[in-house]
């Protein structure tokens, strides 16, 4: 018995010694790591003092610290940044749908500012700025080497003032200048119209107005067409929509889904991930849906298109989306500033991450560049028919009502042809829904 007790004690003692031998170096490494961090912070303090005392000109200490904080955040990824009190206030205003500026969503790539998308109805859109454009200079001043926030600051200015930006565009041999007059940007998050029996829901951004605007616009359009029985489908146009609030993207997706997952987010700690599911109720009542996307569709737009695509609730048409699959959390800081920090990646219901890949459309449809029309082009389109010939026989097999119906259908077809010239991708979506409606009617 004594031997057993001693053996047990010996085993316990050996285990304690072994644990001490393993834990000792780990604790020492952690302590060394902490010491190194504090040494680096001391180094930062030394540099700050040297700049303050010896820089060739007197520096604004507050701006210097803000620049250091922003540098730390922007080194992480293009979407993390420090928001000064003014910038934080501007951001809160933007999510409510009104702000001053040019009307473009931008990111940074290879040291230059890249346009994610121009916003409908804004000075930038009216000046012809396109998704994918690179802005290299503002009023002749190069943006190379500037942080994104600093570059954006250069583009800001009083409403009514002129700004000249230099643009590099794929397919253009040389950079070119664009003059834009700054204005107050009032975002109408959703614009609704009808094309024949199709309801077109154009969503320009995801702010506090988006879902209420979608719900109201959809119901009014359906009412104008005489009820859901007269609607052949819905086009959700997310082209050049740079994104916005995650909550609004979830609500818009939920508007067309009865059940199932919409999106999930996963951060550094897997236990802190979130899943968002649809609730019963489909505003479109099961009617076909086509979602339009392009290279300017980012973030929240990709959540909606990815969710509806994965659930086979919509056909996605257009070109590959931007590929921003990360979630930013805005954290208030002391002094009314804020920190925008990337805290998670989001995943579509099938579990795919869109980061850097984007959403691939089910049907790829490029938007052709519009060529200038000449008078000769216009005349070649006009064709003569039997009805134009002098003395041609009339059609006595149809009643006046039947003839009127044929003429009405022809007028609708001609309107559709006009739409193809103005917006080929949208016309494709409308034609697709028209075809699906014909098949459904036969069934």
Image (cartoon, grey):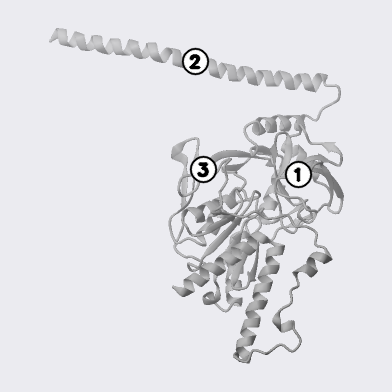
Q: Secondary structure at mark 1?
A: loop
Q: Residue at x 55, y 51 (%)?
A: 303
Secondary structure of the residue carrying numbered label 3: loop
Residue at figure coordinates x 71%, y 18% from the top left: 46
Few, some or many C-alpha atoms within 10 Å of disc 2 (few <14, some 14-19, many ≥20)? few
Cα–Cα gap, marks 1 and 3 = 28 Å
Q: Position of residue 233 (x, y in %)?
A: 55, 68
Q: Quadrant of the N terminus?
A: top left
- Residue position marked by numbered label 2 in the rendering: 29
Question: Alpha-carbon distance for marks 2 and 1?
Answer: 51 Å
The residue located at (59%, 68%) in the rendering is 218
Which of disc 3 and disc 1 is earlier in sequence? Answer: 1
Where residue 211 appears, x then y in whole percent?
58, 61
Task: Name the mark nearer the viewer: 2 or 3.
Answer: 3
Decide if residue 386 is on the left or right side of residue 230.
right
Q: Which mark is residue 353?
A: 3
């Amino acid at each position: 018995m004594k031997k057993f007790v001693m053996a047990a004690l010996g085993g316990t003692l050996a285990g304690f010694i072994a644990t001490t031998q393993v834990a000792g170096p780990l604790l020492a490494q952690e302590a060394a790591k902490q010491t190194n961090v504090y040494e680096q912070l001391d180094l930062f303090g030394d540099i700050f003092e040297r700049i303050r005392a010896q820089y060739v000109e007197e520096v604004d200490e507050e701006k210097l610290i803000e620049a250091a904080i922003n540098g730390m955040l922007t080194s992480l990824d293009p979407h993390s940044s420090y928001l000064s009190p003014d910038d934080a206030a501007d951001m809160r205003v933007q999510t409510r749908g009104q702000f001053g500026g040019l009307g473009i969503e931008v990111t940074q790539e290879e040291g230059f500012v890249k346009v994610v998308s121009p916003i409908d109805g804004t000075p930038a859109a009216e000046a012809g700025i396109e998704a994918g454009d690179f802005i290299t200079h503002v009023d002749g001043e190069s943006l190379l080497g500037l942080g994104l926030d600093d570059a954006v600051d250069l583009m800001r200015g009083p409403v009514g003032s002129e700004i000249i930006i230099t643009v590099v565009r794929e397919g253009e041999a040389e950079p070119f200048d664009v003059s834009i007059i700054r204005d107050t940007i009032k975002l109408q998050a959703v614009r609704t119209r009808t094309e024949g029996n199709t309801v077109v829901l154009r969503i320009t951004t995801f702010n506090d107005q988006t879902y209420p605007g979608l719900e109201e616009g959809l119901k009014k359009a359906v009412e104008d067409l005489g009820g859901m029985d007269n609607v052949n489908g819905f086009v959700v146009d997310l082209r050049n929509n740079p994104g916005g609030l995650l909550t609004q993207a979830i609500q818009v997706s939920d508007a067309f889904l009865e059940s199932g997952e919409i999106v999930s987010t996963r951060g550094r700690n897997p236990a802190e991930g979130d899943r968002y599911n649809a609730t019963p109720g489909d505003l479109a009542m099961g009617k076909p849906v086509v979602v339009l996307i392009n290279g300017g569709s980012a973030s929240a737009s990709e959540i909606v298109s990815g969710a509806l695509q994965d659930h086979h609730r919509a056909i996605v048409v257009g070109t590959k989306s931007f590929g921003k699959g990360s979630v930013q959390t805005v954290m208030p800081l002391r002094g009314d500033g804020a920190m925008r920090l990337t805290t998670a990646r989001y995943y579509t219901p099938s579990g795919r991450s869109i980061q850097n890949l984007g959403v691939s459309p089910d049907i790829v449809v490029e938007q052709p560049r519009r060529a200038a029309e000449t008078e000769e082009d216009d005349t070649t389109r006009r064709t003569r028919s039997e009805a134009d010939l002098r003395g041609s026989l009339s059609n006595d097999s149809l009643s006046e009502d039947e003839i009127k119906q044929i003429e009405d259908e022809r007028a609708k077809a001609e309107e559709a042809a006009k739409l193809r010239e103005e917006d080929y991708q949208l016309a494709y979506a409308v034609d697709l829904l028209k075809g699906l409606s014909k098949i459904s009617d036969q069934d």
